[in-house]
Amino acid sequence: MSITDMWKSNAITLILLIVLNLALFTLGNTPWLVLGLICLAGGMFLSYRQGMGFGHEACGILQMVEKARDPESPSYGQVDEKVERRAWSASTGIKGVLASALVPYVVGCLYIVLSLLKIHPADAVMRLVSWVIALPFWPAMLPFSQTFDRLTAPVVAVLMISPFVLPLCTFAGYMQGPKLWAKSEKAMAEGRRRAKAKSRVGRKKSVPRSQRPEI
């Protein structure tokens, strides 16, 4: 998994949640609160599962890269830098989190700064943009505040925290990569052993018995 893959995955999930919440927003606060939180939980779970897939794939690439670095391996020196950058590493996952959260976080910060400085009408434009980007996370704020047109503490909390929610879920799944890869390798090894055992049993059964002379 590359940083770009993580960014694309989180961007698609965020856009999907925004579209869903635009429809739920028209139902009123109570339905939006319940259904919005359900959608958010689903989006977080989806990001986690995607991160698991990225982590498992990246561990496979890491194994290939390690073989290519071994002078005694037949594939020594056969992996380029682009492939190496897709290999599993915690730093890649952290960079993916920061890259995925960058745009929503910057937009939120701009709105806060423009609002504090009272720069009109730029603050109103950025309020609308930041509201749309953070729309999937507003249902979590409704029990504390139902005001979006003023810079309150709950609004600031949503704007500053929400950009990291989906990326961190993806990162949590990505960090499961080594464990998932070890399980899949163990399962494959056990499958090969069972296949060999069955083949040996089959060969023993197929050996013809020596015929005794008739008396």
Image (spheres, helix red, strand yellow):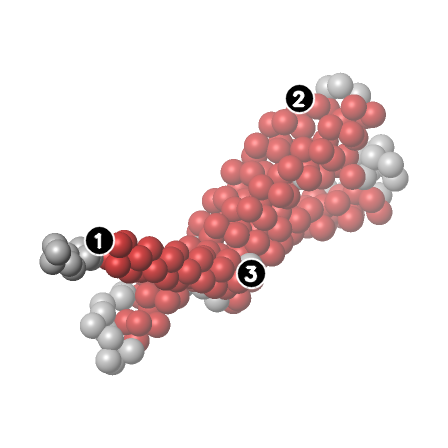
Residue in view at x 73 percent, y 19 percent: 26
Residue furthest to the bottom in view is 71
Nearer the observer, disc 2 or disc 1?
Answer: 1
Amino acid type, callout 1: Ser
Nearer the observer, disc 1 or disc 3?
Answer: 1
Residue 74 visible in the picture: yes
Residue furthest to the right in view is 144
Q: Quadrant of the N terminus?
A: bottom left
Position of residue 162 in the picture relative to residue 208 (left or right): right
SS for callout 3:
loop
Residue in view at x 20 percent, y 72 percent: 74
Q: Are marks 1 and 3 in contact (CB under 8 Å)?
A: no
Q: Quadrant of the C terminus?
A: bottom left
Kindly identify which residue carries mark 2: 23
Camera-side residue: 78 or 2?
78
Kindly identify which residue carries mark 1: 206
Mark 3 Cα within 10 Å, few/some/many (few <14, many 20+)? many
Identify the image quadrant of residue 147: top right
Residue 110 visible in the picture: no
Identify the image quadrant of residue 94: bottom right
CA–CA distance in space, label 2 to label 1: 67 Å
Position of residue 141 in the picture relative to residue 7 (left or right): right
- Which of the marked residues, 2 or 1, is nearer the chain's N terminus? 2
Is 26 above or below relative to 146? above
Kindly identify which residue carries mark 3: 175
Nearer the observer, disc 2 or disc 3?
Answer: 3
Report x, y in % for residue 176: 55, 59
